[in-house]
Image (tube, rainbow, N blue to C red):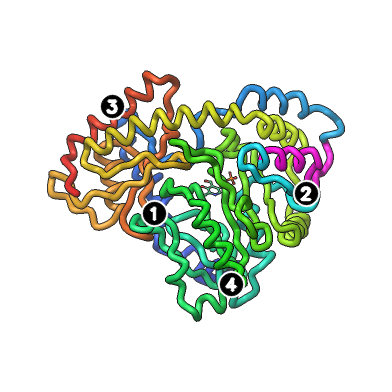
Amino acid sequence: MNFFDDKIAERLGGRNFGKATEIYKFELIKRAKSAARREHPDIPLIDMGVGEPDWPADPLVVASLAAEAGRPENRRYADNGIPEFQQAAAGFLRRVFGVGGLDPERQIVHAIGSKPALALLPICFINPGDVLLTTVPGYPVSATYTKYLGGGVYNLPLLESNGFLPDLDAVPTDVLKKAKAMYMNYPNNPTGAVASREFFKRVVAFARKNGIVVIHDAAYAALTYDGYTPLSFLSVDGAMDVGVEVHSLSKTFNMTGWRIGFVCGNSKAVRAYADVKDNTDSGQFRAIQKAAITALEHGEITAVTVKKYSRRFDLLVDALNKLGFNARNPRGSFYCYVKAPRAAGDGTEFHSAAEFSDYLIRNCLISTVPWDEAGAYVRFSVTFEADSEQQETQTVRELQRRMSALDLRF
Ligand SMILES: Cc1ncc(COP(=O)(O)O)c(C=O)c1O
């Protein structure tokens, strides 16, 4: 027996930690990519699986970091953040989403990216035995932490028949009794669906009636298309009484590696988050917070990105439909989510999206992300590498050429 065999906490599997044979989806994709590259070193891989922007941060933002990085006043622990960042976030919420009236000091606190915020929020609300309602497929961080805390997770499937919105009326009464919080994310990863104001109103009524705290993950909130105006949960009457919204600069301003976002909304909930955060980290580097202010004040950075993604969606959706998929331009995020085919012309049958995605990498060197939680779907991301419009067209044309040889059946 090794010293650590009986030391790992039960929440990580205890004595079974590290022995699970189930392989994490993204690890499978990584392995399939390496195998395909090894077998076909001469064919470039088309990576449609990436969940982050292909562009770097805007030069204005980079210049701001460069100027701030060496200033002595920025060197110290930032703790729960600098007031200027909170004020800039309030301005961003007002300009982009029409959400005014937030007190920056009491209702906005920065986060070292939205991922840690989504991890810390369950610590604020979940007692052992409490349940988190969470949309699936989706970003699992709050659900994972809820389980770490001895809470339960109830999945709300996102189905095409319901516009990829959860059916709140379908939650059983015994679950509602234990439900303490609900996680949702719109525009949604991976479905690309957006929420309507009516849906958010229903969420507020549902939360109030059942005493459920709402955590809205707005990581893609500013990336919207086709006339859909960015919508914040907090813009709906009563939302501020029942919930918080988590924002991120990662996707909106091409700043994934910079690690900056913020939690906003109900002042008591934000204070609870600030308290847990203060006991967890010592704040993001002030120079990064200051560069983030530059980003938040330059909405045109997002506008250029939206234009690029929109152009790429037109190309991709057209190509996928020609291949037999039922693809539609999403109204938010940078994902195109389509039903996986049933089989390929060579007789291979796909019993899950994971099987199709694996086949696609191995046979076409095209990487996607499969989702099997609520139907078999694959996610194509328009953040694929391309330096010019011409290259975007070439990449999608090449994808179509490679995939048409598969003769997919639906
Ligand atoms: C839905 C969703 N929420 C949150 C995040 C985390 O973003 P970040 O921690 O970079 O702010 C991601 C990243 O992929 C995401 O897809």
Three-letter residue code for mark 3: Arg
- The residue shown at (36%, 46%) is 337
**In front: label 4 or label 3:** 4
Label 3 vs 2, first from the N-terminus: 2
Q: Quadrant of residue 216?
A: bottom right
Dot 3: element: helix
Disc 3 target residue: 397
Disc 2 target residue: 103
- The residues tagged by marks 2 and 4 sit, at their Cα atoms, a distance apart of 26 Å
- The residues tagged by marks 4 and 1 sit, at their Cα atoms, a distance apart of 24 Å
Disc 4 target residue: 209
Dot 2: element: loop
Dot 4: element: helix
Query: What residue span does the magenta drawing correspond to?
Result: 75-92
Label 4 crowding class (10 Å Cα cut-off): few <14, some 14-19, many 20+?
A: few
Q: Quadrant of residue 38?
A: top left
- The residue shown at (74%, 47%) is 101
- The residues tagged by marks 3 and 2 sit, at their Cα atoms, a distance apart of 49 Å
Three-letter residue code for mark 2: Asp
Q: Quadrant of the N terminus?
A: bottom right
Label 2 vs 4, first from the N-terminus: 2
Q: Is residue 359 left or right of residue 117?
A: left
**Residue 367: image tag:** none
